[in-house]
Amino acid sequence: MQQNLRASKHRAEELVNQKRTLLATVEAFFIQLTDGAVVAEWTKQAERAFGVTAEEAIGQPFRDMAIAWTWTAVQEAMAQVTQRRAAVHLNKVEVARPGERTRFLKLALSPLPKDDGLGLVLMGEDITEYLALEHDLSQAQKLESLGQLAAGVAYEINTPAQFVNDNMRFLSDACVDLYAVLNRHAAVLAAAKVGQPMTEAITQCEAEAQRVDLEYLVDEVPKAIAQSLDGVERVAKIVRAMKEFAHPGGEESAYEDLNKAIETTVEVSRHEWKYVADVTTALAPDLPYVCCQLGPINQVVLNIIVTAAHAIGDLVKGTNRKGQITITTRPMEGGVEIQITDTGGGIPDAIREKLFDSFFTTKPVGKGTGQGLAIARSVVDKHGGTIVVDSQMGQGTTFRIRLPVKPPEAPPLEKAA
């Protein structure tokens, strides 16, 4: 009997050691809580993540642990796990430790049914370096996009600037001619005031008006002024759009007008699509503001517009035809949908599943990094949304982006306002 007990105890100890060895080999930290939310397991990775040793943690109420993170979000997640008996995920939990930079954790909380109640398991990993790398990659891709747009934007600015310059030269010459006619009119007026014969002065005035083609100037000068004002406004619009696109705000989420953001992105990407497609928008006037990081969302829309333009460009190359890109927005329950449809050649079934994979591209070497759509999916995922693609060969492609108005961790609109 005692031998059997010793054997059972030995097997139990082996299982415990195996579990500890296994937990020590993974990068993620592991915390086990009892039914009363008391720490029952605290791995070495948890020690490194929080600066609390296992001896200090085990046996202590978890809510009393001196962890400088967002306790409200963690406790709400724990309550949800207990109520729903289902796992809850927190994608970006800030942890602050004295003398160190803020770090970020990805946390999964799962129920652990036991004979004496329902325990909890918290598994997480430090994603600080991953987020930094992802941010750098996103910035690099954004700079690449801006670089590609720069030549087109310069061209878009140069065209109205050129006809403004030409109009200014015309108006300068027109002013000289008009001053000459005014001087002749002044001579006629002066002669009339003193009672001198005006025949010669009138003849000279009429000759001057005929020389400068006064009727033409009266007709064309207002047109030149109107064209110049329109050109200046066109340049100002492009500059404003580029500024809003490149510097939409900080890294904090805020409630944003996606319709305006889409119009801005269409404007700055004009040179990418203007020769191969027409762009039409049908933006819902009642679209609610969405809590998001506007810069990354702008990048998502830009990447898809450019992808659509390239798809159409490949189809109409060598012809006089142009395709169509249609962008629509609509409110939906709890969120919004952005739909971008093109009349390109479509996406083959064989590559559709790889479309959002990092570094996947069908373009020749040096023509694309394969990061545009991968980053688009990453951005949408982080906002708690979805992005799907529907495509038929020979008929075109539609991207549907759905975003929640208020992600789980977003402040209420009234508070943000």
Image: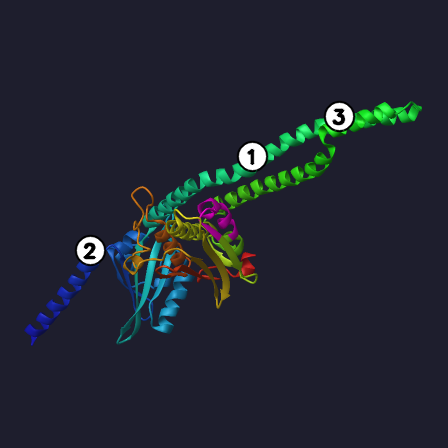
Q: Earlier in the sequence, mark 2 or mark 3?
A: 2
Residue displayed at 25% across by 58% down: 43
Q: Is 67 situated left or right of 291 in this image?
A: left
Q: Where does the N terminus fall, quadrant-wise?
A: bottom left
How far is mark 1 from mark 3, CA to CA?
28 Å
Magenta stretch: give its range: 263-278
Query: In this orientation, does residue 257 appear?
Result: no
Q: Which residue is mark 2?
A: 25
Q: Say which amino acid is labelled 1.
A: Gln
Q: Is residue 178 above or below residue 340?
A: above
Q: Main secondary structure of the magenta part?
A: helix
**Front position in the image: 53 or 102:** 102
Q: Is residue 116 above or below residue 374?
A: below
Q: In the drawing, what numbered circle is on residue 180?
A: 3
Going by the numbered disc 2, the residue's amino acid type is Thr
Above or below, 211 against 35 in this view is above
Q: Position of residue 360 (x, y in %)?
A: 29, 51
Q: CA distance from mark 2 to mark 3?
A: 92 Å
Element class at badge 2: helix
Circle 2 or circle 1, nearest the eye: 1
Q: Position of residue 320 (x, y in %)?
A: 44, 48
The secondary structure type at the circle numbered 3 is helix
